[in-house]
């Protein structure tokens, strides 16, 4: 059967075998699974269209709770079964409980004497917001539980849920597209166009697109096999990629040269970033010059909005999270009699010998007092200005925590009233902040 | 519900609520801060000058204050509301544009200006004919998905069902009880509410999409404003965005994120998938400096009373640190309130009666003035001033006039800088200054800062090119500024640029050279004049007589301390005056707990008070001894036992059912072998150990390990080091040591029957000097946490731990 879908022949054959138009041959449940954007929904949709059988398509990710799912099922069963039900509004009790939902369906089917085969497709059934387990429980053995013999449930799901592992319904697996398949699918349809004023012949356009797709898929295949994501990358890179052609430097048929020119573009993560349209407000023209300078600064540093105290707090929090508290005295104490504490030096060396870089591990929780102590110690190292600890400081900590830069961990000890905190900013950003406040971060980190 | 949430919901939490202490002030007898008497009327101000101020004047101060504040509020509102018009236009463009097919337009507002912009934006949106619904979402409302969507549905379709719910709910509950229905409340609520939305659950977005279809809005928009998108639960936010995206074709959504960080930083927190669903348009809103400039000009400079330099510096620093306009306005308001509240001279006084004279004589500026007279050997003058009130009155009135004329001069000079001269700042390092900066640096009493600033000003002037100088001169000429006019007409009246102009455009080299020479001469001449102009145009406020009364100032740092109180001070103060936090009334009532409270303060407070009188070098055992003997042992234990035995409370009887508490507490108190004294000793030791470490670490943690003097540092650090070592020792030797100590030290278990007194001393001496209190405390905390409840019952509570959790 040809339904116009590439590289999914095996799955279509399986569908032909399992999803039958006759009631007797239809299984009570079928499972379509595979990673996202591998064509599960599309293939099934096309297949059911050619099959000419009643079916209701439910997007589970749009259902906040199971009640909404029940309601949606009844509604779409009514519309899709083409029954002439006068009142589309459903019985108010229909979505109260599973039993009343089943009863409502029973009543409906009996009243209109509907016993044709009806496929119920639960698309993205693992992405329901709540009650996911209840949903599976309800519809796993729907025919047996409800006694509605003419309904077959088709789950579309990313991976098989635990509940269904021991069941053996017919499963159709959609494997991720291979490199070649991706290229052939994507190059079939030209998504991005050259500007019309360039007057590039259609043939060149097609061949150019093909090589462009090949290049992008080859470059990014190890990063993602998701066809939608690759499509986005194609679109994102396109304008920058063809810039030399627009400028007239390179002709469209000199693809290799163009690739060489754009090597850095492909290698960078530009294709993966989110496009942002940026507007800076400038009411006074006089200030334009200053603003632009600031803008440049802002582009490189996205933390300029924080106050300097907050920056110190963040750096201190990072140090507290990634340094061992035993070594605090070594880094932050003004006392230099290191030899007196030999056991600690030994320990330090031992910990240095360990190969794991703590930066790559999860940040460790620390006491608030420790954060404050470290902040006091590192505040303005050069100028030796003492930090005044006033309410402002606690406010800043609260602010940072509401910005989710600092995370308060759950304290399960009731006796010890201390709170434990963690830093939630990665090393690159902290490094940037440290540079901003002229703090030699590397001197204070263990590794 | 996950495990932690469940545990949290199960734990008992005691919240101490202080009874309102605000009793009615009796104006006849009550004196506030030994300074003022309350007024009879509703005016919250006091009669100052030890109550000698006339009530009319006090009332007038209040009136002046209210008028001033009203003016500030109106003006600031006016300014902020009309500030961002161009930005609003840009925003409207995005709102009016159609959404693309696959993405939802999202405005990311990087808002550094404060909350007022959002209000302004919402008001602006209301006027937009395309905008149909505006929904503001706050992270506090949106704790779960259901609530969030329900909030959206509710605000779009305002069905008056909320009143009906009340009635149906009652019925519903009745049904529930009789049927034994095990559905939770939440579900039932949903059902009932559902009936008002065509029998649907209230968190069904289909309701909205149907509503949109019915009303068929082609161009209309539903705008979702996330007020504090940074504080949203990310899990919910991700799901919500995805959910909204799936409805994009049915409901014309536009999203507005009010961000507190740049979008880049925020996006790191958002799921990658979700980012592709939204079309981000970032707007940066950082004109706080420009806004501040306008506010300073309109609120501070145009006011009759200026800010004193130190206060201006405080406000400036605060603003530089957080750049929040709302905050700035609030501090300004507080400063004004403090000025009018505490300064009896703040109302307009044409004649000073005697009670005003004495405060005048105590001011620093008056003393300086006397010194000055003394140097000039005008002894008669001094004597008359010190004895004759009339003379003082005269002096005051004169200095008032002088001061206000100086203020006028200053204002003119400030305007000259900010209106004319500031345009040439771009050439120098002054360009980053805002108006508050300029204000502060002009009047600061820090000589170095001010001279540097003035030098910068002169330097800027010297760097002007010929054209700039000409332009500057012309601008000064046409300026309406009185001071500048005077300067131009008197000092520079003969300066002409005509000849120089001719030379400059001439082609002859000679003339060009001539031009250069002449220009240099002219500039040098003008620079000198300019320098004297800057230096003489106004006097420093701090040098003027009675300046303390004519400026909004902060002499005792009250404003600073109230707005940014130091942490440590607050902590110490609250430990010393726990009555402010805990309602332990002094009047002895018949309540037995009250009586006990009367005998003993919260343990933490008691320990702290001893701690304050000693230093950290004190041996812990001595510390314990002084603590123990500072308490009235017999009275306390008697009261304690009476409370425990009291039939009314039945505290001990309750412990019979609890195995652990029975072992630890019931047996201990009912043990006839131990005397009252011993019981008291044991109890007090436990209390002491519990609180001691809290005091030591709590107070020390305020300091860091570095910035304290050497002696202190050694002791704290060795203490902390000891802890580290001890923990390792503990690991080696095992817990026996602590258990032993628990038995002897705490004496709550049966192990206490050994010769207690001797053993205790030896053990405590040994343990406390060798061990550190932390281990001890932790072990004791774990083993004897049951006693915590006794502690709670008996001592009211501690100051720091307002919540005591029952384990």
Image (tube, rainbow, N blue to C red):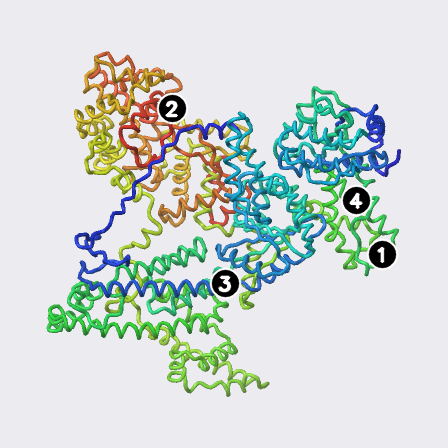
Q: Position of residue B227 (x, y in %)?
A: 53, 49
Q: CA distance from mark 2 to mark 1?
A: 77 Å
- Disc 4 is placed on an element classified as helix
Above or below residue A124? Residue B672 is above
For residue B727, the mark is 2
Q: Residues within 10 Å of mark 1 (few under 14, many from 20)?
A: some
Q: Which comes sooner in the sequence, label 2 or label 3?
A: 3
Q: Nearer the viewer, residue B301 or B664?
A: B664
User: Which residue in the structure is indicated by mark 4?
Assistant: A213
User: Do the residues marked 2 and 1 share a common chain?
Assistant: no
Q: Quadrant of residue B37?
A: bottom left
On what subunit does the disc labeled 4 rest? A
Kindly check if marks 2 and 4 are in contact, taking CB atoms under 8 A apart as contact: no
Q: Earlier in the sequence, mark 1 or mark 4?
A: 1
Q: Quadrant of residue A334?
A: top left
Placement of B31 over or under A37, stated as above or below: below
> From mark 2 to mark 3, how far is it between C-alphas?
61 Å
Q: Is residue B726 left or right of residue B108?
A: left
Q: Which residue is mark 3?
A: B81
| Residue A211 point in image, percent of width and height | 82, 45
Asked if both marks, 2 and 4, belong to the same chain, the answer given is no
Does residue B354 show up? yes
B487, B402: nearer the viewer: B402
Residue A200: mark in rendering: 1
Q: Residues within 10 Å of mark 4 (few under 14, many from 20)?
A: many
Q: Secondary structure at mark 2?
A: helix
Is there one chain holding both mark 4 and mark 3? Answer: no
Q: Mark 2 near mark 1, Cβ–Cβ under 8 Å?
A: no
Q: Considering the numbered disc 3 on the image, is that residue within a helix, a strand or a loop?
A: helix
Task: Please state which of residues B515 and A221 is positioned toward the viewer in this rendering.
Answer: A221
Q: Residue at x 19, y 74 (%)?
A: B394
């Amino acid at each position: 059967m040809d339904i116009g879908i590439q590289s999914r022949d095996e799955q279509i054959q399986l569908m032909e075998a399992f999803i039958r138009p006759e009631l007797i041959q239809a299984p009570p449940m079928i499972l379509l699974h595979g990673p996202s954007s591998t064509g599960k929904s599309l293939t099934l949709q096309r297949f059911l269209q050619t099959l000419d059988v009643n079916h209701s398509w439910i997007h589970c990710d749009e259902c906040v709770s199971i009640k909404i799912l029940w309601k949606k099922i009844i509604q779409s069963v009514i519309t899709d079964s083409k029954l002439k039900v006068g009142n589309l509004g459903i019985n108010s009790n229909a979505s109260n409980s599973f039993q009343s939902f089943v009863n409502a369906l029973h009543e409906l089917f009996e009243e209109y004497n509907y016993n044709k085969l009806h496929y119920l497709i639960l698309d993205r059934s693992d992405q329901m917001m709540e009650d996911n387990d209840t949903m599976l429980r309800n519809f796993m053995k729907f025919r047996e539980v409800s006694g509605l013999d003419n309904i077959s449930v088709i789950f579309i799901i990313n991976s098989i849920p635990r509940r269904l592992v021991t069941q053996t319904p017919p499963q159709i697996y959609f494997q991720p597209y291979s490199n070649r398949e991706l290229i052939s699918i994507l190059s079939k349809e030209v998504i991005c166009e050259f500007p019309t004023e360039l007057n590039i012949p259609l043939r060149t356009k097609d061949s150019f697109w093909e090589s462009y797709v090949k290049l992008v898929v080859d470059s990014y295949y190890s990063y993602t096999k998701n066809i939608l994501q690759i499509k986005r990358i194609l679109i994102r890179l396109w304008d920058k990629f063809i810039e030399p052609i627009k400028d007239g430097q390179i002709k469209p048929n000199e693809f290799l040269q163009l690739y060489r020119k754009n090597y850095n573009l492909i290698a960078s993560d530009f294709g993966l970033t989110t496009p942002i349209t940026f507007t800076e407000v400038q009411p006074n023209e006089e200030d334009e010059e200053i603003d632009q300078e600031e803008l440049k600064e802002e582009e490189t540093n996205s933390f300029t909005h924080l106050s300097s105290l907050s920056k110190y707090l963040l750096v201190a929090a990072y140090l507290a999270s990634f340094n061992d508290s035993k070594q605090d005295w070594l880094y932050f104490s003004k006392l230099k009699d290191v030899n007196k504490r030999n056991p600690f030096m030994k320990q330090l060396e031992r910990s240095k010998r360990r190969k794991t870089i703590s930066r790559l591990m999860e940040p460790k929780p620390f006491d608030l007092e420790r954060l404050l102590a470290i902040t006091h110690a590192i505040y303005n190292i050069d100028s030796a200005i003492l930090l005044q600890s006033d309410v402002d400081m606690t406010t800043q900590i609260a602010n940072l925590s509401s910005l989710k830069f600092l995370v308060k961990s759950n304290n399960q000890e009731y006796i010890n009233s201390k709170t434990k905190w963690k830093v939630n900013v990665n090393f690159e950003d902290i490094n940037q902040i440290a540079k901003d406040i002229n703090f030699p971060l590397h001197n204070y980190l263990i590794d | 519900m996950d495990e932690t949430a469940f545990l949290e919901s199960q734990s008992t939490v005691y919240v101490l609520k202080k009874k309102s202490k605000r009793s009615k002030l009796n104006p006849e007898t009550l004196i506030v801060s030994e300074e003022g008497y309350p007024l009879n009327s509703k005016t919250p101000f006091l009669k100052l000058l030890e109550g000698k101020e006339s009530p009319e004047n006090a009332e007038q101060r209040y009136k002046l204050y209210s008028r001033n504040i009203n003016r500030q509020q109106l003006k600031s509102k006016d300014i902020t509301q009309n500030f961002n018009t161009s930005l609003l236009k840009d925003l409207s463009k995005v709102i009016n544009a159609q959404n693309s097919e696959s993405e939802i337009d999202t405005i990311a507002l990087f808002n550094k200006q404060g909350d007022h912009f959002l209000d302004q934006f919402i008001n602006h949106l209301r006027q937009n004919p395309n905008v149909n619904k505006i929904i503001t979402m706050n992270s506090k409302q949106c704790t779960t998905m259901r609530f969030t969507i329900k909030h959206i549905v509710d605000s779009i379709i305002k069905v008056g069902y909320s009143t009906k719910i009340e009635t149906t709910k009652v019925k519903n509950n009745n049904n529930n009880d009789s049927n034994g229905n095990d559905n939770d409340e939440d579900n039932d609520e949903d059902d009932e509410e559902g009936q008002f939305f065509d029998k649907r659950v209230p968190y069904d977005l289909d309701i909205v999409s149907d509503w949109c279809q019915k009303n068929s809005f082609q161009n209309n928009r539903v705008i979702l404003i996330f007020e504090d998108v940074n504080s949203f639960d990310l899990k919910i936010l991700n799901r919500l965005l995805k959910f909204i995206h799936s409805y994009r074709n049915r409901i014309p959504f536009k999203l507005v994120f009010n961000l507190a960080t740049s979008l880049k930083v925020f996006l790191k927190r958002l799921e990658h998938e979700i980012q592709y669903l939204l079309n981000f348009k970032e707007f940066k809103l950082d004109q706080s400096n420009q806004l501040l400039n306008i506010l300073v000009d309109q609120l501070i400079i145009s006011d009759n009373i200026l800010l004193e330099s130190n206060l201006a510096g405080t406000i400036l620093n605060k603003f530089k640190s957080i750049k929040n306009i709302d905050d700035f306005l609030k501090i300004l308001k507080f400063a004004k309130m403090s000025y009018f509240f505490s300064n009896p001279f703040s109302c307009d006084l044409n004649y000073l009666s005697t009670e005003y004279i004495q405060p005048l004589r105590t001011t620093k500026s008056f003393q300086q003035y006397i010194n000055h007279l003394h140097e000039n050997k005008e002894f008669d003058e001094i004597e008359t001033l010190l004895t004759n009130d009339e003379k003082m009155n005269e002096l005051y009135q004169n200095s008032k006039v002088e001061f206000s004329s100086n203020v006028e001069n200053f204002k003119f000079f400030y305007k000259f800088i900010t209106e004319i001269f500031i345009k040439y700042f771009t050439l120098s390092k002054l360009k980053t200054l805002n108006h508050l900066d300029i204000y502060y640096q002009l009047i600061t009493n820090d000589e170095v800062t001010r001279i540097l600033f003035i030098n910068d000003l002169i330097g800027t002037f010297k760097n002007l090119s010929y054209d700039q100088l000409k332009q500057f001169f012309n601008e000064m000429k046409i300026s309406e500024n009185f001071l500048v006019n005077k300067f131009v007409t008197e000092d520079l009246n003969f300066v002409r640029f005509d000849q120089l102009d001719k030379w400059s455009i001439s082609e002859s080299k000679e003339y060009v050279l001539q031009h250069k020479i002449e220009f240099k001469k002219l500039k040098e001449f003008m620079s000198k004049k300019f320098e004297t102009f800057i230096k003489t145009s106004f006097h420093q406020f701090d040098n003027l007589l009675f300046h303390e009364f004519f400026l909004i100032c902060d002499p005792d740092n009250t404003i600073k301390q109230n707005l940014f109180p130091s942490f440590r001070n607050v902590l110490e103060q609250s430990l010393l005056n726990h009555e402010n936090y805990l309602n332990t009334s002094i009047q002895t009532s018949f309540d037995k707990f009250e009586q006990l409270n009367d005998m003993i303060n919260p343990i933490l407070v008691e320990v702290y008070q001893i701690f304050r009188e000693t230093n950290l070098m004190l041996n812990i055992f001595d510390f314990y001894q002084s603590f123990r003997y500072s308490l009235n042992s017999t009275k306390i234990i008697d009261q304690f036992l009476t409370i425990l035995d009291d039939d009314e409370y039945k505290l001990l009887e309750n412990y019979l059912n609890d195995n652990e508490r029975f072992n630890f507490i019931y047996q201990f108190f009912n043990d006839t072998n131990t005397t009252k004294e011993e019981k008291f000793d044991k109890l007090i030791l436990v209390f002491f150990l519990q609180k001691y470490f809290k005091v030591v670490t709590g107070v020390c943690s305020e300091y860091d390990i570095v910035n304290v003097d050497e002696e202190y540092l050694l002791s704290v650090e060795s203490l902390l080091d000891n802890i580290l070592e001890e923990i390792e020792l503990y690991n080696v030797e095992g817990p026996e040591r602590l258990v032993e100590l628990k038995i002897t030290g705490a004496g709550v278990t049966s192990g206490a029957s050994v010769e207690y007194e001797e053993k205790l001393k030896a053990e405590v001496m040994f343990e406390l000097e060798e061990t550190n209190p932390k281990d001890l405390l932790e072990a004791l905390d774990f083993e004897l946490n049951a006693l915590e409840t006794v502690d709670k019952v008996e001592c009211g509570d501690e100051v720091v731990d307002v919540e005591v959790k029952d384990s």
